[in-house]
Amino acid sequence: MSFSKRLSWWRSAEIHHRREDGMAAVRGDFANRVLRTKLALGMAVVMASAGPAIAQSDPADPASTMPDCTYQGTNYLLSVTNPPSADRQFIMDLLHRYNWALDEGSLIGVDEMLRDDVTYELCNSIEKQVELKQNKVELEEYLENLSNELGHNSAITRHIESNTLLNAVDADTVQGKTTVVVTIQFGGIETPVLDYTGALHTVFKRDASGWKFASIILITDGPKISFRAR
């Protein structure tokens, strides 16, 4: 065999071996991919089969052990008896001052807005009682703790009230219902986030020093409640 023919044969053989090596590499890579796919599918099956067991092992819904909300509803929404203008303005100012106190994180002035026997109740949308404070001391302590927690997290709240209805029960008792929307502005983000929406049900009573909160019931629109700016 001439030298040129031997060189041509050698080059052909080298190209053939390279092709074989390349195909082997492709087959090996494909096999590895198949193996990884099988493993992934296997993990998915394991996780899927474990899902129901995990769900079944969750603790019972805490709402089942919570007391019922004491709020019984109102029957004056279609036909309210408005209090006199001066009384209405005084009561509306109470609402505004209370919400500004919550936003500013200060209890200054709140004490004089509350009767000594004021009650505060926080309920969720499924009529379960989350919090209950039965006098002014308990309520002020609760509000102070919330304020401290918000301050610790560098958060600013805005309590926005609307659609307030006032119904005069007698000369010294007025019922109220107000829509509330509350946002929280955290220091690390640019825009505020919605905290909750709900209805604020109130009772105001007048004593020798003027109108005061006798009852505050906040019912949120959501069934679950974590830490919020009340």
Image (tube, rainbow, N blue to C red):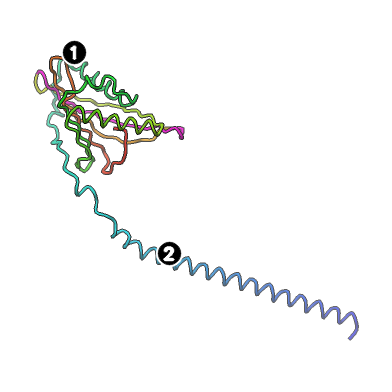
Label 1: which secondary element: helix
Q: CA distance from mark 1 to mark 2?
A: 68 Å
User: Furthest-left residue in view?
Assistant: 170
**1 or 206: which is nearer to us?**
206
Q: Which image quarter: residue 53?
A: bottom left
Residue at x 57% of width, y 70% of height: 32
Q: Position of residue 156 (x, y in %)?
A: 38, 29
Q: Residue at x 69, y 76 (%)?
A: 20
Residue 45, given in percent of the width and then of the height, sits at 40, 66
Q: Amino acid at mark 2?
A: Ala
In the image, which disc is placed on residue 78?
Answer: none
Could you tell me which quadrant the N terminus lies in?
bottom right
**Quadrant of image for the C terminus:** top left
Relative to residue 223, is residue 13 drawn left or right? right
* First of labels 1, 2 by sequence position: 2
Q: Which residue is mark 1?
A: 86
Residue of label 2: 44
What x and y, as percent, mark residue 160? 31, 27
> What amino acid type should be assigned to the residue bearing mark 1?
Ala
For residue 187: magenta? yes
In the rendered image, the vertical position of residue 211 relative to residue 117, given as above or below: above
Decide: few, some or many residues near mark 1? Use Cα within 10 Å; few <14, some 14-19, many ≥20: few
Left or right: 27, with 52 as reference point: right
| Residue occupying the point 26% across, 38% down | 221
Most common secondary structure along the magenta stretch: strand
Task: Identify the image quadrant of residue 33.
Answer: bottom right
Residue 29: x percent and y percent? 60, 69
In what element is the residue under mark 2?
helix
Magenta-drawn segment: 171-190
Packing grade of label 2 (10 A; few <14, some 14-19, many >=20) is few
- Up-down: is 13 above or below 171? below
